[in-house]
Amino acid sequence: MLKSITRLAAASLCVWSIAGVAAPLPAPADTTIRGGTYASTNFDGNLLVTRASSDPTFVRKALLDFDLTGAIPSGSVVQSAALTMTVHWGGAAAARSVGVFDVTTPFVASQATWDVASATRPWNKPGGDLGREWTRTSVPNGAGARAAFDVTALVRAAATASPPHARLALVDVDTLTAARDGYRDYFGSEATDPATRPSLAITTGPAPTPSPSSLPSFSRVFVIVMENKEFADVIGNAAAPYINSLVSQYGLATAYTGVTHPSLPNYMALTGGQTFFTTDCITCRTPARHVVDQLVDSGRTWKAYMDSMPTACSTTDTSLYVQKHNPFAHYTDVVGDTTRCVRHVVPFTQFSADLSAGALANFVWITPDMCHDMHSCSVSTGDTWLSHVVPSILASPAFNNAVLFLLWDEGTTTTGGGGVIPAIVVSPFTPPGLRVSRPMNHYDTLRTIEDAWKLPPLGNAAAASALTEFFRP
């Protein structure tokens, strides 16, 4: 009981604001996890600690869980979010780089250890189930010093989950030159002085209003995602005659970039407004809301067709089908609901029958296999596959009031984060041969879909711009 009262007393340090008015946000549940011989010890109620070490016994990570319920008013978006930690004591190094990672598995602060998230649930990986690094800052070693982290993107993503929680880990990501260099401890939510407790300040504002006149209200949206090619690898390449014929007949973005590397984070950005992960992890999941959740809420339908997928909702990689190119295998509310997943994430062999029967969903996602998407085979092979698939879509009555986004997930350079990649917009509303040179990326495509269907923007799509230039009345 005492612990609960203390945490509630810290609420005044954690605020959200809208129109300049602040209101309480519940204080975080927080703890430290420690490796090695302390891997089974719970440190809830003590100072929060980050430490890097070559000895697993000395490695520590600080975990915080902010409940965002009610923090983002309906119709509003997160404009900024700042996490502030107060240093209690630091090691010899004057400054250490500390990163903020999202924690992908819910944890119980009073039970979590290096090995388990709670008394009944082990971590998938010892040391905590961490997603991507969202931000980092330099943390001084002086007692009472403040360390501020810009966690805007993380909170935007967390706010879309149900229930909404910003679960994060502070991790020392600096180099190690001496045993004590990596040590920092911080006041936790139970500190005697409320001013030293962790604080999360969230500023919200009205969600951008879509312009109903700038985009058609598509009956269907098709998305096909190819793999790992820079713009010049495809556009103007004689090995891709069909793709280049689409360019001459429809629209081409000439400054479209991937968000990052490698593949999976780009697929997540395109469907969820955040990259969520930093690797092509197979078993990683996020509870965040995503575009198909929005579609269902709006009364629309969806289906994802995976080329060479052995069975519906397969979570087993083969030589041609891989989960890193299937974003829906990484959303908890899809892959964790077998009935939903089997109905909506299916082998591409079902596509032709659905098309012929006039049974296509409002949102159609197509992932070619590892050969047809140009990942492991030639540009020519991918072009040939598209030349067999896309004409059937364009010739169908299903395309009368539709759009097809033919995209590549990433390129081979780091320009714009993930390289300059081809992005072709195919629609009855797109003037032939149109080229648009404005910088764009996957968040802009997601924003286009959301604006066309009057859906609230997810994550980084809130700051993106719809591809309105490609559509004429």
Image: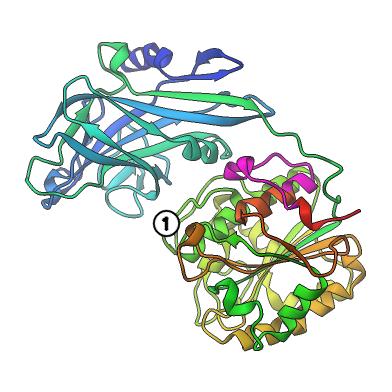
Q: Can residue 304 be seen by looking at this rendering?
A: yes
Instruction: Please tell me whether mark 1 sits on a helix, a strand or a loop.
Output: loop
How far from the left and from the top, in percent, is residue 401? Answer: 89, 60
How far from the left and from the top, in percent, is residue 458? Answer: 62, 43
Q: Can residue 373 be seen by looking at this rendering?
A: no
Residue 77, placed above or below residue 430: above
How far from the left and from the top, in percent, is residue 68? Answer: 51, 28
How far from the left and from the top, in percent, is residue 125? Answer: 32, 55
Q: Which residue is mark 1?
A: 278
Q: Depth check: give the residue in front, 43 or 381.
A: 381
The residue drawn where x is 27% and y is 52% is: 126
Query: Is 453 inside the magenta-drawn segment?
Result: yes
Look at label 1 and name its amino acid: Thr
Is residue 176 rendered to the left or right of residue 127? left
The range drawn in magenta is 450-467
Query: Within the image, what quadrant is residue 171 found in?
Result: top left
Is residue 227 rendered to the left or right of residue 195? right
Residue 217, placed above or below residue 262: above
Residue 471, placed above or below residue 465: below
